[in-house]
Image (cartoon, coloured by chain):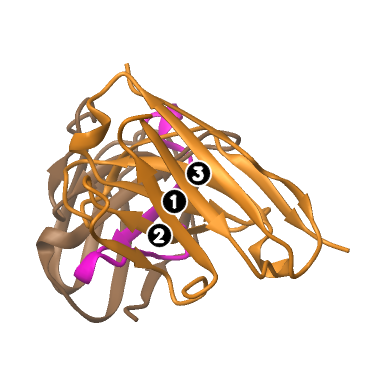
Chain colours: A orange, B brown
Amino acid sequence: EVQLLESGGGLVQPGGSLRLSCAASGFAFSSYAMAWVRQAPGKGLEWVSVINNSGAYTYYADSVKGRFTISRDNSKNTLYLQMNSLRAEDTALYYCAKALGAAAGPPVGSWGQGTRVTVSS
Amino acid sequence: EIVLTQSPGTLSLSPGERATLSCRASQSVSSSYLAWYQQKPGQTPRLLIYGASSRATGIPDRFSGSGSGTDFTLTISRLEPEDFAVYYCQQYVGSRGTFGGGTKVEIK
């Protein structure tokens, strides 16, 4: 069974940084692209970033480009999201998600429960 | 950036009725790169359809997807009580996936 467990969320001041982690199990982590998707309170889904299976290719939403960095450690079955220069509008529940395939583009078929990020002074 | 517009915002229907949800893209999207998700309150999203018309594993055949170019449709042939939820379309052209704003299917 696919399991994705996010951690690292919390309360941070505007301009601050956080690093989210997603521990994956139940599947061959190094064979699948992974993504981060967020959902602000009471709002819809927003795609944030995706990384291919090897980590060679990464893509970002315009709203986070230059501030967020996605990465993965296939030896640890872990996905990361380094978030810098955080803004109030980054406040959301951040989901880690497993893609259907290896390339950074397929839709996501499995989701974690999310980790909450609140940016506020 | 491709913008997806979903309509209607809310669909009020009774169990057993047919639901037709629309997703319109601001520019052409390859059918291979259009997906639909379902999200119930307090739950994580679930992939229903990918490649515009392929059902994901375990999805009942009352869910079907169609469309091409800029216009895509999710159809639920006969609504079951568990189908009342919010539905999102997503495109992933160029490996950048954007979601539509969602359609809420509520019980009439």
Give percent across and percent down for residue A85.
66, 70
Give percent across and percent down for residue A8.
64, 40
A58 or B70: nearer the eye? A58
Q: Disc 1 is attached to a residue of which chain?
A: A
Mark number displayed over residue B7? none
Question: Considering only order in the chain, which callout, 1 or 3, is on the residue closer to the N terminus?
Answer: 1
Q: Distance between the residues labelled 3 and 2?
A: 11 Å
Amino acid type of the residue tagged 2 in the rendering: Ser
Magenta stretch encompasses residue A75: no
Q: Distance between the residues labelled 3 and 1?
A: 6 Å
- In the rendered image of this protein, does residue B74 appear above or below residue B46? below
Q: In the structure shown, which secondary structural element does the residue marked by tag 1 occupy?
A: strand
Q: In the structure shown, which secondary structural element does the residue marked by tag 3 occupy?
A: strand
Provide the residue span drawn in magenta.
B80-102
- In the rendered image of this protein, does residue B27 appear above or below residue B22? below
Which residue was labeled with disc 2? A49
Neighbours of disc 2 within 10 Å: few (<14), some (14-19), many (20+): many
Q: In the rendered structure, are the residues bearing label 3 and label 1 in contact, judged by CB atoms less than 8 Å apart? A: yes
Q: In the rendered structure, are the residues bearing label 3 and label 2 in contact, judged by CB atoms less than 8 Å apart? A: no
Which residue was labeled with disc 1? A36
Which residue was labeled with disc 3? A95
